[in-house]
Structure formats: C-alpha cells, structure tokens
Image (cartoon, rainbow, N blue to C red):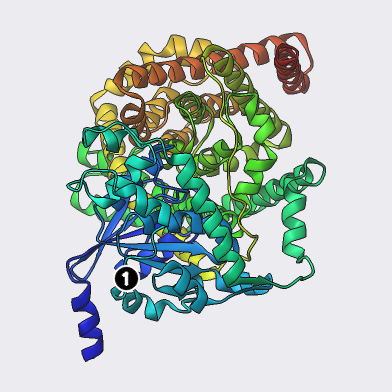
C-alpha cells in the first residue's frame, strides 16, 4: 500500500498525454487509467477528437492517431499543441511495426519532455516471430519501456509505476547541436518544431521557420533503423491464414465477392432475424399486447378516455404509448443488432480493408477509400459520421462526404425500420429501393466531383492485422452505443409525440396536412397524413420513418415514402453538426438542398410508377423502374469514365 501511495504522489497533478500512431490501442490505456469508456476498435480513426479524463489528481488526454507532430494535418496540429503543454508523454507503440512507430517516439524524445514507451500488441509480435530485446531498447532510447497486451490486461498493472519513471531520453546529436542556435528563452520543445519548419510555432515565437526538417528527418530515420536492427530479431515463419485472408479482402477478384457475402450475411442477421423475428416479439407482443393496454388502462383511471390529456398521453401520437413502443419495442432491438454487427466489423479489422478495396471506386466521386470510414459509421450514427469527416485529407473531400452522408446514408435506427418495411414488401421492391439510393449516391457523388473544384487526396491508411473480435469489447461497445441512443433519443421522441399530439387535438395537424396536399398527395402520391411523418423526421429521421407505420398505404406508396424519408434531411443533432463543421451559410444550403432533392426524387418515382401502371400490366411498373434506374446509372458512369480518359 505504501508503494502504491508513493507511486500516486510521484505523478500527482501532472498532465499525462497519450500519443501514438493510428490503431495502436491508445483508447484501451485511456479506459484503464480513467475508468471512462471510449470506443476501442481495430481500425484507424476511432479517436477523432481529443478525449480527456482524470486518474486521481492527474489529467489524462487521449489524442488522435498521428505519425508525427509536424502540422501536416489537423490531427497533428491538435496533438502538437497538447504535447507541448504535457508533463509526461506516454507513447503507445505497435510492437509489430516498430520501424514505423519509433519515428514518432524519437520525435517526442527530441522535444525534451519526459517520455514513457509502451510496446503494445506483444502477442501479435510473438505470433509473427518478432523478438524485441526490451533492455537494449531502453538503453538506446534512454526512456522506460513497458511491454503489454492491453486488450487482455497483460502488463497493465505496471503502467502507473512505469509512468512514474518517465524521463527525458536520448536526443539526437544533430538536434542537440541545432537547438543551441535558437534563443535560450524559447521552450526546448518549441525549438525542435521551429527547427523542423513548423510555421505556426515559429510565428508565435517571432522567428522564421527553420530549414532543417529534411536533415533532421533523415537523421532520425537512420537512427531508428539502427535501433530496430539492434533491438529486434525476426524469425522466418509461415504466413498465417489471417494474413492470407486479409490479402484476399483487398484484391478485387476475391474482395468483392467476400464483401457481397458479408453484406448478405448482415442483411440476414439484422434485416431478417432482428427486424422481423425479434422486433415482431418486442413490438407486437410485449408492447402491443401488454404495455399499451396497461398504459391506457392506467391513464383511463385518471382521465376520461376521450379527454384531451388522454389523447395526448395514450392516443394516436401518445407521449407514453408511441414513445415507449417505438423506442423500446421497435428501435432499441434494431439499433442494438446493428451496433453489434458494426462492432464486430470494427474489431476484426475489416473496415480499413473495405476502404482499400473501394478506393478506386470512391475516387470517381471525389473521395478516396478512407471515406469508407465515415460512410460506414453513418450507418451507425450520421452525427458521429459527420464529425469523423475530419479524417479526410482536404476540405473538398469533407464537403462532398458531408453532402453524401446527409442525403443518402440512413442511420442504424432508420435503416433497421426500413429493412423491416422492405421485408414486408418483397424482394422486387427491396431491389428497386436499393437501386434508387445507390443511383442517388452515384449521380450525386459524380456531380459533386465535377462541380466542386480541387483534387482528391491519395489514400494513406494502416491495415491492422485481422483479429477475432473480443466478445467483452463487442458487447460493451454495442450496449453503450445503444443505451446512449435511447438516452439521447427519448426526450426528442417524447417532445415530437407531444408536439404532434397537440397539433392533432387542436386541429392544426389537419390544416398542415391539407396545406401540403399538393406535395404529399398530388406529387408524391401519399396519404395526406404522411405530412406528419415528415414533420417527425425533422426531429429524428427514424422517428419519421417509424411514423409511416401509422398510415395505411399500398406497396407502391410505401416505396415512395421510404425513398423520400431516406433522402430527407438528417435529424436535428446531425443538422447542428453540419452547421458547426460547414458554417451557417453552407449548412443551410445543404439542408435546403437535401429537402428539395428528397421530394423531387420521391415525386419522380411516383410519377414514373404511375405512368408505367397506366400503360403496362400490373406487375411491370417495378421492373420497368428498375430498368430505368440501371440505364441511368450506366449512362452516368459511362460519361464519367469517358471524361476521365
């Protein structure tokens, strides 16, 4: 106990910064030190913001994954400023990629700040026949080195003790020599960045940026190569099955069928089993047969069944019945199922391989393969995905990704409801719906790529090793995300139900529906009551989609409604992020543009189906519509290919 107390005293009140390359496990160490859970995933970009917590009296900061603190991108600029104000730097290193990761390590050491190096993923290194001499590595770097397998907790018990031992390491002789050329009053850490040509740090110190970047980088790379040669020994081992599978995943001939098989499996799990079997039990039996009758009986004892309060609480848009039924009976199992799937994809390391596989395709839309990460995250939560667009290399790519996310990507809750409705319509309608959304994605991305000036950046992304997902992490992550969704959505759902209930009992809802008849009835071909679904969709997309269940509609009307609500504006939270990231002027243009596109496309689908129905047999309209969409996509892609040539 005395030893533990002394350990705490030695780092009391310190600002401890976790620094490392992407996908080295920094978040696991943050979780361990602070007890605060953040996402742990096997793909780059999990941490897109700075996350802070406390360990006793010490401040712990988890920074985005970077390759240096040299201001080459926004993540490096943010991390640079945090590092410069840190007291202790805990550098998390991937033991499998020492030659890559130790370059950042030496740059941190050259700042003159106390450093601790943590070699994580030692189990992976051992499986690949990599033997690291920790004693030699400590002597060469001049700082404490701890080996860990963070996901299993191995070595974590020594983490705080090792942090106490942090010290200034061996600075490169070239750096030590050049540091003397700068004024003594400047902090040593800032001197290093000035020498390396950091314009912002140089400007705030009133100096011109140095011209030694290439010289210092060259010396640092040669030194790290020598360190790895002296401290690491590799034995030849046969290629593992995970390495072979990982290579197959990024080659088009094998990768595309594997991706198609994966998507089919996900649909069967989420779209069929969860959306039909599980939700059929939770919504129809638990809520429909037990909860709602009980709620109406209780409210009926307090208020007259036909009273205004009773209608607001347990009526058609009942604050109690509608909110609880949709949240717990419909949305929660769907969101939980999707989050489980997404967590498995993250933990296995498959997502960055999808990014590599689809890089060339996304270049046609002004993006690179790394845009797969916000696009996939968007199927979990569009709000989170919009924030993750910061990972993209240029403002042009961020703008394109933001518009595509706002327009074509449904979140997990909305997607799950859509899957449920499509399952009841049949495969033909499901195919046409998918073709519509894909065609909007293709044509929208192509037009944005042509209209927005600039060029796409090249794809630079780590391919982490394929791993079996860890059950505890998958379950914890999925539950936390799903619970957070319910906690965040519940008041908004209740507010939306209350607003609709008040509009209904006051007669205002009918007036709004009548006002929108030219749009909803004549153009979209929907019941006039569908206007309330679009009103709810402004509050939460999935709320509006779920509201479509309340209205009797034909199969064709359901297809039009689902298409329109999918392309409709994102929820309030996502809209606020768009305004924050893109500014009010551009954010408003995106918001209004998405609304206009949604209604234009929804109306076109209705008009085309009406035309085909009046001129062809009853079963032909859907087939004809699919043909028109396919021909349109082929035409757009053909024009794009010819223009690129």
Q: Is residue 522 visible?
A: yes
Residue at 22%, 72% in the rendered image = 11
In the image, 610 versus 394, the foreground residue is: 394
Q: Where in the figure is residue 463, as x and y percent of width and height?
A: 62, 52
Q: Where in the figure is residue 177, as x and y percent of width and height?
A: 36, 51
Quadrant where the C terminus is found in the figure: top right
Q: Where in the figure is residue 63, as x and y percent of width and height?
A: 36, 52
Is the residue marked by circle 1 packed among few (<14), some (14-19), or many (20+) residues within 10 Å? Answer: many
Where 627 sits versus 555, above or below? Answer: above
In the image, 527 versus 411, the foreground residue is: 411
In the image, 544 versus 169, the foreground residue is: 169
> Which type of secondary structure does the marked residue at label 1 adopt?
loop
**Figure quadrant of residue 346:** bottom right
Q: Is 223 situated left or right of 534 in this image? A: right
Where 243 sits versus 338, above or below? Answer: below
Q: Is 72 situated left or right of 218 in this image? A: left
Q: Is 204 situated left or right of 516 in this image? A: left
* Residue that mark 1 sits on: 166
Where 373 sits versus 578, above or below? Answer: below
Q: Is 247 situated left or right of 16 in this image? A: right
């Amino acid at each position: 106990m005395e030893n533990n107390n002394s350990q705490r005293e030695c780092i009391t009140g310190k600002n401890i910064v976790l620094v490392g390359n992407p996908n080295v496990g920094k978040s696991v160490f943050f979780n361990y030190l602070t007890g605060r859970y953040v996402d742990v995933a096997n793909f780059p970009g999990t941490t897109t913001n700075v996350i802070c917590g406390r360990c006793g009296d010490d401040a712990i900061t988890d920074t985005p994954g970077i390759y240096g603190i040299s201001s080459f991108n926004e993540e490096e600029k943010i991390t640079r400023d945090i590092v410069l104000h840190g007291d202790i730097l805990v550098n998390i290193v991937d033991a499998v990629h020492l030659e890559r990761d130790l370059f950042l390590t030496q740059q941190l050491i050259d700042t003159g700040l106390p450093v601790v190096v943590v070699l994580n993923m030692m189990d992976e290194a051992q499986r690949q026949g990599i033997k690291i001499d920790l004693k030699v590595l400590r002597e060469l770097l001049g700082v404490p080195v701890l080996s860990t397998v963070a996901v299993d907790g191995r070595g974590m018990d020594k983490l705080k003790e090792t942090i106490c031992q942090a010290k200034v390491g061996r600075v490169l002789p070239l750096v030590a020599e050049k540091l003397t050329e700068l004024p003594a009053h400047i902090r040593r850490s800032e001197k290093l960045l000035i020498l390396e040509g950091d314009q912002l740090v140089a400007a705030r110190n009133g100096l011109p940026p140095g011209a030694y970047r290439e010289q210092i980088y060259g010396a640092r790379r040669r030194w790290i190569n020598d360190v790895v040669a002296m401290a690491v020994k590799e034995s030849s081992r046969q290629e593992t099955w995970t390495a072979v599978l990982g290579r197959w995943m990024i080659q088009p001939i094998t990768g595309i069928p594997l991706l198609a098989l994966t998507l089919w499996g996900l649909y069967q799990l989420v779209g069929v089993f969860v959306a039909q079997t599980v939700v059929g039990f939770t919504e129809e039996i638990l809520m429909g047969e037990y909860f709602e009758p009980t709620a109406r009986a209780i409210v009926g004892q307090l208020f007259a069944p036909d009273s205004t309060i009773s209608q607001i609480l347990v009526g058609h848009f009942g604050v109690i019945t509608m909110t609880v039924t949709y949240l717990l009976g419909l949305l929660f199992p769907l969101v939980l199922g999707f989050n489980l799937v997404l967590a498995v994809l993250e933990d296995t390391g498959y997502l960055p391989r999808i990014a590599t596989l689809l890089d060339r395709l996304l270049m046609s839309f002004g993006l690179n393969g790394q845009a797969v990460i916000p696009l996939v995250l968007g199927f979990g939560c569009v709000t989170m995905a919009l924030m993750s667009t910061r990972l993209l290399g240029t403002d042009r790519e961020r703008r394109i990704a933001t518009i595509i996310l706002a327009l074509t990507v449904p979140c997990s809750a909305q997607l799950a409801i859509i899957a449920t409705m499509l399952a009841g319509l049949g495969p033909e309608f499901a195919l046409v719906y998918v073709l519509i959304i894909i065609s909007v994605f293709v044509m929208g991305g192509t037009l944005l790529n042509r209209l927005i000036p600039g060029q796409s950046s090249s794809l630079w992304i780590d391919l982490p090793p394929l791993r079996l997902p860890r059950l505890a992490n998958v379950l914890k992550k999925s539950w936390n995300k799903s619970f957070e969704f319910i906690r965040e959505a519940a008041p908004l759902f209740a507010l939306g139900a209350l607003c609709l209930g008040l509009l209904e009992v006051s007669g205002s809802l009918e007036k709004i529906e009548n006002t929108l008849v030219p749009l909803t009835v004549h153009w979209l071909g929907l019941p006039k009551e569908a206007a309330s679904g679009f009103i709810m969709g402004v509050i939460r997309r999935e709320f509006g989609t779920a509201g479509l269940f309340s209205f009797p509609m034909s199969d064709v009307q359901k297809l039009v409604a689902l298409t329109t609500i999918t392309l409709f504006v994102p929820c309030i939270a996502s809209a606020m992020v768009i305004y924050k990231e893109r500014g009010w002027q551009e954010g408003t243009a995106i918001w209004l543009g998405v609304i206009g596109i949604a209604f234009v496309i929804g109306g076109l689908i209705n008009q085309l189906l009406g035309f085909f129905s009046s001129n062809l047999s009853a079963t032909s309209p859907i087939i004809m519509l699919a043909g028109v969409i396919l021909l349109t996509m082929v035409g757009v892609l053909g024009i794009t290919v010819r223009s690129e040539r």
